[in-house]
């Protein structure tokens, strides 16, 4: 085995690890963003409910 083959294998291995890490990071960031959107939606709905209850009391 010469140095060129070893170097190619190391670079290929690092490249594959990088792809797996990028996919993992992308999926993780998408999953983490969803709860934030749900909290925001819940806060908006709570505000709408409060305003509707306030209108009904008047």
Image (cartoon, helix red, strand yellow):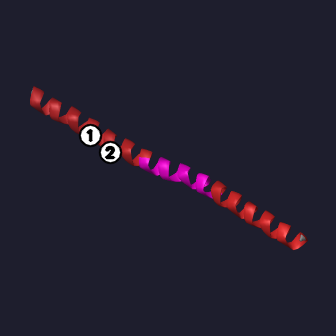
Is 28 included in the stretch rendered in magenta? Answer: yes
In the image, residue 27 lies in the stretch drawn in magenta = yes
From the image, give the main secondary structure of the stretch colored magenta. Answer: helix
In this rendering, position of residue 37 left or right of residue 52: left
Of residues 9 and 19, the one nearer the viewer is 19
Q: Position of residue 8 (x, y in %)?
A: 16, 35
Circles 2 and 1: CB distance less than 8 Å? yes
- Tell me where residue 58 appears, x and y as whole percent: 89, 71
Crowding around mark 2 (Cα neighbors within 10 Å: few <14, some 14 to 19, many 20+) is few
Residue 33 percent across, percent down from the top left: 54, 52
Q: Quadrant of the N terminus?
A: top left
Residue at the spot 10% in from the left edge and 30% down from the top edge: 4
Q: Which residue is mark 2?
A: 19
Q: Which residue is mark 1?
A: 15
10 with respect to 38 (left or right): left
User: Tag 1's secondary structure?
Assistant: helix
In this rendering, the answer to whether 11 lies above or below 57 is above
Would residue 4 appear left or right of 33 to someone viewing this image? left
Choose top left, top right, bottom left or bottom right for residue 49: bottom right
Q: Is residue 26 left or right of residue 53?
A: left
Q: Which residues are magenta?
A: 26-38
**Residue 5 lies in quadrant:** top left
């Amino acid at each position: 085995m010469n140095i060129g083959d070893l170097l190619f294998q190391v670079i290929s291995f690092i490249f594959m690890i990088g792809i797996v890490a990028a996919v993992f990071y992308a999926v993780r960031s998408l999953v983490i963003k969803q709860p934030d959107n749900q909290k925001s939606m819940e806060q908006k709905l709570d505000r709408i409910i409060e305003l509707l209850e306030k209108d009904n009391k008047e």
